[in-house]
Amino acid sequence: MQTDSNNKLIANYLFIGGLIVFVMMLFGVMMLLTQGGVIQLGPATFYQFLTIHGTGMIGACALAASGVMWYFLNKHVVLSKKIFITNLICFLIGVVMVIVGVFSFDYASAWTFLYPLPTLSAKAWGTIGALLYLFGMLIIGIGFLLLFLDIGRAIIKKQGSLAKGLGWDIISGKKSEKDAPHVAIVAATMVTIVDVVALLVGATVLMMNIIHTINPAYTFDPLLAKNFTYAFGHVFANSIIYMSVIVVYELLSKYTNRQWKANKVFLIAWTMSTFFTLIIYTHHLLMDSVMPRWMLITGQVLSYANGLPVLVITAYGALMIVYKSGIKWDIASGLTFIAMFGWTIGVVPAIVDATIVVNHVMHNTKWVPGHFHMYMGLGAVVMLFAFMYYLTKVDKQIPITKLDWAALYCYLISMFLVSMQFLVSGAISTPRRWATHIPEWMGPALFGGIAGIFVMIATSIFIYHFMNYFFYKNSTKDS
Amino acid sequence: MRLSLLLYFLLILPISREVLESYMVTHMFVQLPLLYAVGMLFPNRKEYKTRHIWSNIIFVLGLLSFWMVPRTLDDALVNTYTEILKFISLPLIGYLWKVSWRHLSEMTLAFIYTQLVSMCGLFAWLYLDTPIQICNNYLINEQKIVGAIYLVITIFMCGYLLKIAFIGNKKT
């Protein structure tokens, strides 16, 4: 009974997350069609859409991914359901504030809310819009902070410390590999460490922006503010994939009947990614010539190294666990496996962009959206959809139709095309975050807008299938 | 009880008030914490019920937020009522926190602690970085010292957080 109630709550997380992702896709498509010259949004509306699209996508994916992590982690440690509900409530309150700030008060600084833009908008928006957005983000952050503190508390209670949650006692040889923490605990420990740091830094920079918005006489160092903003935003967005990847470990283990055990290499890789994830946000500041040189070089080198340890051991592990396992492919296992492919190829444009000489040319082009649409759209989000199908299968035995399979292929092809048009746009030097395009830039944007419509169709089928979770009567259980 | 009253008496003396309130650093980091300590040292004769704890905590956090606003420090110097409020509310914060905090869950304590880390970091940044004079009664160079102290406090608090998380603590 308790499990049923927990799973319903997790399903709510995923449904709300999935629904917001769908609506954000609509804004994304409208922006691409505007850039493609098909519809006319007007610059002010475009930048409002840009703000809500970026903020909403990251927030919704983080919400759904935290639900997935909670589902698997709760099998190994004792988590607080009250905190889990509180996070959802905070999220919803924050989302309403952000929506009102953006659409009723014209706030449009993009998710980056880079100081001093929230205050100095050239009268594009006012104080109330900025405050609603900033306080909304703060409340969402408070909810997530509570959730990660609870996860950290539970891991410390089970393992003794977060160091042991990352398996440092195994790495140092004090314990044998057979005593290693479960893979879900290792991943959750990593996410807890990086996200608590990110959220604390985020709270500081949000409060600083709030103070500046209320009284612009209080000015701050913009470079430090930018560092803090990306130390919050990049790390938090990056952690979504590390929450979602638990799906890969758990689902492929179940489908292949083979255990995915944490060994020394696995633990070292997760420890490396923990530190690198916290440091590499500086690759967003490679164009800031006033940044200390050593930080920029560190940003470049560690950006190369960041994703690779966990990515390599997970991709390799996924191939090994599936090899000659006699796995029965369905949509959940298929999506899980394909997500690894999306994650792997999605990292490549980021590594290219993290090279300082390339970054100076490419960072302000659509190359960067190409990276994160591929990374998130074909990696993290696919893992979340995989979990949605898994949950409907194990809890409700909802049958999979040909339409679901069609949606899978449609999603993968069209999402790949959306990502590619961004990369092609980047390659032809199309600037990002521009409401209007010259004719030479319009072709890929229009193509992306059309591909985006197909992504939306496929996503709506995924969500429709998952919606059955709440209404479908499980005949096996009833009988 | 005696120690608490003695400390309160010493703090309320005009000479100690004048000395401690002459400098921003001593006002903020000596007088205010000592007034808080007065409440902490006050003996607890009443066993609080759990249902009272949250009203205490909300009251404490509300008052703390009030005293975190730099303007209140200024007001306490020029407005007698604010000064009286300071000498009543801060010992009260100390006392209510003393009788309440043990009843809080480790989650709540962790949340309050992490919020304090974030706020101390913000104050360090605010006092060190902002070019304007925040308090009318204290000079800019004094607020820089306050900012530096906040920065040190933030670093120590982060260090303690890391210790709890990575090395562990018997209580946790």
Image: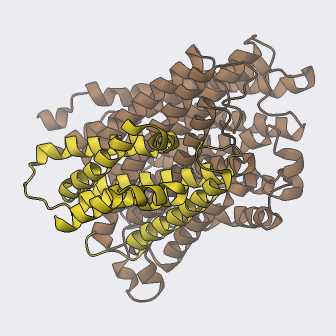
Task: List x then y, in percent, for residue A37.
Answer: 81, 15
Quadrant of the frame with the N terminus of chain A: top left
Between A42 and B6, the residue placed more toward the observer is B6
In this rendering, would B11 be left or right of B105?
A: right
**Which residue appears at 23% of the width and 56% of the height?**
B101
The correct choice, above or below, for B136 with respect to A39 in the image is below
Number of marks in the rendered image: 0
Query: Residue A43, located in which quarter of the rendered image?
Result: top right
In the orientation shown, which residue stands out farthest toward the top? A40
Q: Is residue B9 above or below residue A470?
A: below
Q: Is A282 left, or right, of B3 in this rendering? A: right
Q: Is residue A449 left or right of residue A1?
A: right
Q: Which chain's colour is yellow?
A: B
The residue sitting at the bottom extreme is A174
- Say if residue A191 shows up in the picture: no
> Residue at the spot x=68%, y=46% of the render?
B130
In x, y percent, where is residue A434? 80, 27
Find residue B121 and report its horizontal and vertical position in percent.
Answer: 54, 55
- Residue at screen point 73% across, 45% down: A222
Q: Nearer the viewer, residue A148 or A174?
A: A148
B57 over A463 or under it: above or below: below
Q: Colour of chain A?
A: brown
Q: Position of residue A448 (x, y in %)?
A: 73, 27
- Using the image as rendered, state which of residue B81 and residue A71 is in the foreground: B81
Which corner quadrant of the image does residue A427 belong to?
A: top right
Q: Which residue does the image show at 46% across and 77% down from the upper left?
A: A263
Image color mode: by chain
In the rendered image, the quadrant that contains the C terminus of chain A is top left
Q: Is residue A295 left or right of residue B22?
A: right
Q: Is residue B21 depicted above or below A123 in this figure?
A: below
Q: Nearer the viewer, residue A284 or A405?
A: A284
